[in-house]
Image (spheres, helix red, strand yellow):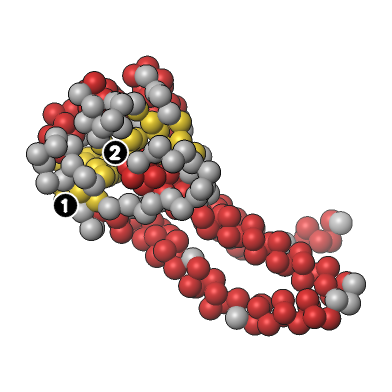
């Protein structure tokens, strides 16, 4: 045992540490997205391939081997959005982030106040808060604002007379990056049919990314929040503030 450890150099330890950091960051980026579900599917296919070879299931083994022959091309096609966002994220983000700043806490409070005001007036709204996954692709198709987050700005964005009120407002780095953004609509059949396009878009963006989406119903004024593809409905002001605070002020590991 001692001879094995004696053969490990400091460069080997550095190599292992760098690989571990890269893998960890990649897992964080795809966590809660469809890419994570696809990886689970690939793991199931790998297990099926091993079982087919072990029990000499010739037809199944042949089919799976044919699939693995094109796995690199399949991965590039399937994970193309995640690969692009991962490369962009690695180029711009720091690997270690600390506690939330006073500016972040103020932004959360402004978002909560704006959401409650919109709900009281029964004005439909969709606010997306970026986390680890880069939302640049969705920001670029909207109307750029790059403005400080404020209750007044969000109210004006979603006012029925505003040309941006039908799309989503995306917030990144405590600023409203863009408004009037179009988001992917969830295709799941498990959600209630009464939910409209805003709620389906809120679920859709959180299925593909780790973002948080807040939706306000223009019919009922109800506030909902989506994260990881799950929708929490009928939120009050205190509950919304608490949930956002817990998500964005906890130390990011």
Q: Residue at x 41, y 20 (%)?
A: 239
The answer to whether residue 167 is above or below residue 72 is: above
Q: Nearer the viewer, residue 106 or 33?
A: 33
The answer to whether residue 207 is above or below residue 240 is: below
Q: Residue at x 26, y 45 (%)?
A: 168
Mark earlier in primary sequence (1, 2) = 2
Q: Is 225 placed left or right of 115 in the picture? A: right
10 Å neighbourhood of mark 1: few (<14), some, or many (≥20)?
some
Secondary element type, mark 1: strand
The answer to whether residue 243 is above or below residue 204 is: above
Q: Residue furthest top?
A: 238
Q: CA distance from mark 1 to mark 2?
A: 14 Å
Q: Looking at the picture, how far across and down is residue 44, in whole percent?
A: 71, 61
Q: Can the viewer see residue 114 in this picture? A: no
**Contact between labelled residues 2 and 1, with CB atoms less than 8 Å apart:** no
Residue 127's tag is 2
Q: Nearer the viewer, residue 145 or 88?
A: 145
Residue 189's tag is none
Residue pointed to by mark 1:
143
Q: Looking at the picture, how far across and down is residue 117, in whole percent?
A: 22, 23
Q: Residue furthest right?
A: 55
Q: Residue at x 70, y 66 (%)?
A: 45
Q: Looking at the picture, how far across and down is residue 90, in whole percent?
A: 41, 58
Q: Residue at x 16, y 31 (%)?
A: 155
Q: Can the viewer see residue 200 in this picture? A: yes
- Quadrant in which residue 238 is drawn: top left
Q: Is 205 placed left or right of 19 in the picture? A: left
Q: Nearer the viewer, residue 123 or 178?
A: 123
């Amino acid at each position: 045992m001692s001879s094995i450890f004696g053969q490990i150099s400091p460069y080997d330890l550095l190599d292992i540490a760098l690989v571990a950091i890269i893998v960890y960051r990649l897992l964080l980026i795809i966590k809660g997205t469809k890419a994570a579900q696809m990886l689970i599917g690939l793991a199931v296919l790998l297990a099926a391939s091993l079982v087919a070879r072990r029990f000499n299931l010739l037809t199944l083994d042949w089919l799976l081997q044919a699939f693995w022959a094109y796995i690199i091309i399949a991965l590039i096609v399937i994970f193309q959005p995640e690969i692009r966002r991962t490369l962009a994220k690695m180029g711009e983000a720091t690997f270690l982030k600390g506690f939330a700043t006073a500016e972040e806490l103020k932004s959360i409070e402004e978002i909560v106040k704006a959401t409650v005001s919109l709900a009281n007036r029964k004005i439909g709204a969709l606010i997306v808060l970026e986390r680890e996954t880069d939302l640049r692709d969705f920001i670029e198709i909207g109307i750029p604002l790059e403005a400080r987050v404020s209750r007044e700005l969000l109210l004006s964005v979603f006012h029925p007379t505003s040309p941006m009120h039908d799309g989503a407002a995306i917030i990144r780095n405590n600023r409203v990056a863009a408004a009037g953004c179009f988001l992917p609509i969830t295709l799941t059949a498990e959600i209630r049919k009464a939910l409209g396009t805003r709620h389906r878009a809120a679920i859709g963006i959180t299925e593909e990314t780790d973002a948080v989406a807040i939706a306000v119903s223009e019919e009922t004024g109800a506030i909902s929040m989506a994260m990881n593809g799950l929708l929490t409905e009928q939120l009050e002001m205190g509950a919304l503030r608490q949930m956002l605070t817990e998500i964005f002020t906890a130390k990011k590991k």
